[in-house]
Image: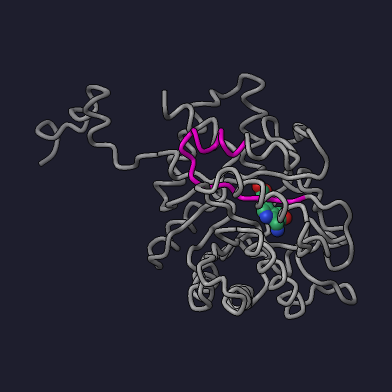
Amino acid sequence: MTFPATRMRRLRTTPTIRSMIRETQLSPADFIYPLFIVHGRDVREEITSMPGVYHLSVDQLPGETRAVAQLKIPAIVLFGLPASKDHIGSENFAPDGIVQQAIKAIKDTNPETIVITDVCMCEYTDHGHCGIVRDGQIVNDETLEILQRVVVSHADAGADVVAPSGMMDGMVAAIREALDDSNFGNVSILSYAVKYASSFYGPFRDAAQSPPQFGDRHSYQMDPANAREAIREAELDVDEGADMLMVKPALAYLDIIRRVRDAFDLPLAAYNVSGEYSMVKAAAQRGWVDERKIVLEMLTGIKRAGADMILTYFAKDAARWLAE
Ligand code: PBG
């Protein structure tokens, strides 16, 4: 049947009928909120390139996490800025490292909030790469040993989920083995399985003070032109024991989210990254876009593409808007 018997506008006549037939429901339960933790006390410093996102000291975390939980956001993901950087990123696996302190402070006060840790070397190393550097190369297998120490220290401090983001081959298997050997069989792995070498990470590298000091990340992160390769990356991580998968970034990669969703039944996250955030903020500050509407549209699009969870700096604002 076609027009005039069929009229698509019939089901668009009122807000109620539109909400009845809405296919995608965005909810605060979908969100994971990233936090940047720094040393010091009473630090709550806005990140210049990411308005509305802050560097927080550990003492700020109980309050911040309570606010997140009150908005019904179930999880946070932690990024740490160490006191000092060195060649192997020693603070990354120090028992009193910044992220380890943060995990404890959060779990002591808000035990029900899911604490996810980003597991990578770039914030901690003086060269800013996501692996051990030898003769100007990022060496894979030695990096795995460091990542094993990092995840065990995070699990020791109370992390629920570890999220390796360095795109090293074999990282998921190495991490699973290290966790299991240390009796952390219940700590799960959210793998940044499909992570592209993207310019959309620009503001984050400012926030995490983690830009590579030489070269770029193209020898480990994926070529933005490749889609079939995303399936291979995800498949390997599933075989290695990942509990959940991630695609990153989100907006320029909605087709990848859909492909991964269709190919695997694991829970799937998408990272609405810093550049995606800051572009909207900048345009909204100029009055060029309606921030609230554009953010909810983008997050709905990411979910419609197939993401079950969305890591986003908009989490708190979006949760508030959804509750109104
Ligand atoms: C660490 C890491 C990065 C991001 C998350 N984990 C930066 C990078 O790979 O350069 C980016 C997050 C964002 O841009 O919001 N490897």
**Which is more toward the observer, 17 or 161?**
161
Left or right of 46? Residue 170 is left
| Rendered position, 316 above or below 213 | above
**Magenta stretch bounds:** 64-80
| Rendered position, 313 above or below 242 | above
Q: Which residue is at a point 81% across and 45% down the rendered structure image?
A: 39
**Which is more toward the observer, 62 or 32?**
62
| Rendered position, 199 above or below 60 | below
Left or right of 17? Residue 93 is right
Q: Which residue is at a point 75% across and 31% down the rendered structure image?
A: 46
**Which is more toward the observer, 185 or 298?**
185
Question: Hey, which quadrant is residue 84 in on the image?
Answer: bottom right
Which quadrant does the N terminus fall into? top left
Magenta segment: does it hold 77?
Answer: yes
Q: Which residue is at a point 49% across and 51% down the rendered structure image?
A: 254
Left or right of 233? Residue 38 is right
Residue 43: % across, % down: 78, 34
Q: How is the image coloured?
A: one colour
Magenta segment: does it hold 66?
Answer: yes
Question: Hey, which quadrant is residue 37 in on the image?
Answer: top right
